[in-house]
């Protein structure tokens, strides 16, 4: 194969495999919180390999006053401040428009394919995030996360802007940044190549969108603690009998779904 043909084949492969990677856009007033998260471990590697893309956006960029105000006092009274709808609305419009522009540059202008996008707002009153939901979200082109702060976000954001109101558990946090990281990680690990060979996902993802987890062990075979007590690896895992090992795994497996 000539070098020219090789380059053309690689170019087609690159466009098909990489240019349609899932893109995460995060709207926050504390962008530095994400620095170590996206700069370390498998997430950083996935970004480098162009399997995923993560953009962190400072909400204050879409304000118009000198103080870059993003919050206001709640109508009807109450403690704390509420994040305003206007800068969030402007941010969502800008990010959606940017993705459409990039999509047109990467595809035929006559293409009628629509961008699969969801806007997610984190709220304790939202739908519970599950493995099944992570599987569905991993099939999208773009996910925009809105990270609330203070006493909350103007309800018009939930009513008019967000596609999904999401909660990662029955507890309150100080903001949406940690839930965003949880969602990005759960979704990203379902993207082929992010956590290893594609075969791993095929073996562990169920037809219903769940993920199979089972007990695992590594060296040493016997771990001795005080009073000479021994913690041993199940003998079946040391036999080399693949059939018996698979049966053991199935018996000790759990489908993570809801």
Image (cartoon, helix red, strand yellow):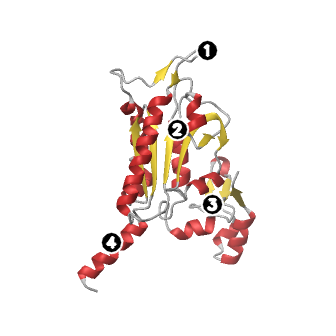
Is residue 81 left or right of 104 when viewed as pictured? right
The residue identified by callout 3 is 216
The Cα–Cα distance between marks 3 and 1, rounded to whole angstroms, is 55 Å
Residue 195 screen position, x and y as percent: 50, 60
Determine whether label 1 and label 4 are within 8 Å by CB. no
The Cα–Cα distance between marks 4 and 2, rounded to whole angstroms, is 37 Å
- Classify 143 as above or below 251: above
Query: Would residue 171 be seen by someone viewing this image from the given angle?
Result: yes
Query: Would residue 214 be seen by someone viewing this image from the given angle?
Result: no
Is residue 214 left or right of 198 when viewed as pictured? right
Q: Nearer the viewer, residue 35 or 129?
A: 129
Mark 1, secondary structure of its residue: loop
The residue identified by callout 2 is 178
Residue 242 screen position, x and y as percent: 66, 76
The residue identified by callout 4 is 11
Mark 4, secondary structure of its residue: helix
Residue drawn at the location 35% of the way across and 22% of the way down: 65
Residue drawn at the location 41% of the way across and 47% of the way down: 97
């Amino acid at each position: 194969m000539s070098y020219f043909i090789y380059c053309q084949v690689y170019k087609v492969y690159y466009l098909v495999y990489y240019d349609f990677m899932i893109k995460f856009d995060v709207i926050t007033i504390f962008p530095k919180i994400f620095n170590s998260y996206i700069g370390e471990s498998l997430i950083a590697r996935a970004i480098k390999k162009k399997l995923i893309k993560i953009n962190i956006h400072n909400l204050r960029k879409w304000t118009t006053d000198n103080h870059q105000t993003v919050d206001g006092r709640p109508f009807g009274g109450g403690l704390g401040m509420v994040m305003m709808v206007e800068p969030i609305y402007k941010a969502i419009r800008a990010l959606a428009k940017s993705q459409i522009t990039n999509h047109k540059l990467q595809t035929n202008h006559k293409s009628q394919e629509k961008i699969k996008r969801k806007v997610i707002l984190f709220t304790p009153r939202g739908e519970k995030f599950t493995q099944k939901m992570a599987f569905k979200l991993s099939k999208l082109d773009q996910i925009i996360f809105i990270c609330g702060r203070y006493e909350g976000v103007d309800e018009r954001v939930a009513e008019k802007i967000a596609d999904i109101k999401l909660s990662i558990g029955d507890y309150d946090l100080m903001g949406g940044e940690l839930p965003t990281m949880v969602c990005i990680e759960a979704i990203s690990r379902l993207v082929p190549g992010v956590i290893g060979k594609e075969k791993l996902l095929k073996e562990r993802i169920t037809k219903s969108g769940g993920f199979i987890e089972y007990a695992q062990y590594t060296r040493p075979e016997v771990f001795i603690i005080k009073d000479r007590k021994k913690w041993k690896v199940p003998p079946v895992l040391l036999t080399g009998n693949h059939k018996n090992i698979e049966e053991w795994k199935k018996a000790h497996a759990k489908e993570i779904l809801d």
